Amino acid sequence: MEHGSRDITLRFLAEPSDVNFGGKVHGGAVMKWIDLAAYACAAGWSKKYCITVYAGGIRFVAPILVGSLVEVHAQIIYTGNTSMHIGLDVRANDPKDPQQTLTTHCIVIMVAVGDDGKPTPVPQWEPTAAHDVFLRESAIRLMNMRKEIGDEMQAHVTPSNDVLSQ
């Protein structure tokens, strides 16, 4: 199965409309940029329309100021049958200063869908470099942890009869 590039970087300036009440770029704007980069990465790799099924581990490390040059780097770190796990880093800097600061990082899972709207297979990614093997193994560990968290969260979504009868 043919695939595209494993990674992509989006670059743009943070605009005044992206700023929250505290004068920094708000988290919702950053999450939108992350979702856009994850989509571009997944669609580029799979050559298919993709949907977001998970975004997690989002860490807001440092604020982004209006007027900053923002760089969102996305790369495939694991592929399932129909899913692609994408690691994302957001970095920012004053355009007059080349020193970038990591501001946010997270993992997003995208699923490729066919014309019928159902999940469809994606090209597999096999790491060769040691760091890429580490990233894939980390993605697998995180996937297993998410399953445990999902089981715990189910209690919040569907209350058990035991709790209701108390």
Image (spheres, rainbow, N blue to C red):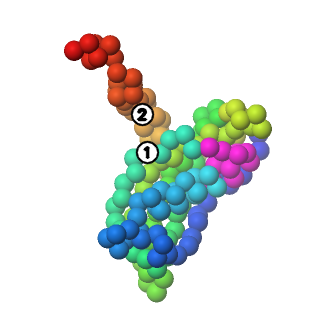
Q: Which residues are magenta?
A: 41-51
In the picture, measured across the screen, residue 45 lies left or right of residue 17, that is right
**Mark 2 and 1 residues: CB-CB less than 8 Å, in contact?**
yes
Which residue is outermost to the left? 166
Above or below for 113 versus 4: above
* Res 122 quadrant in image: top right
Q: Is residue 103 visible?
A: yes
Q: Who is closer to the viewer here, 23 or 133?
A: 23
What x and y, as percent, mark residue 117? 71, 35
* Res 63 quadrant in image: bottom left
The residue type indicated by label 2 comes to Arg
The residue type indicated by label 1 comes to Gly
At 73% from the left edge and 45% from the top edge, which residue is drawn? 48
Q: Residue 47 in magenta?
A: yes
Q: How many discs mark residues in the rendered view? A: 2
What x and y, as percent, mark residue 20? 38, 68
Above or below for 61 versus 128: below
Q: Is residue 64 visible?
A: no
Q: Which residue is mark 1?
A: 56
* Dot placed on the residue nearer the N-terminal end, 2 or 1: 1
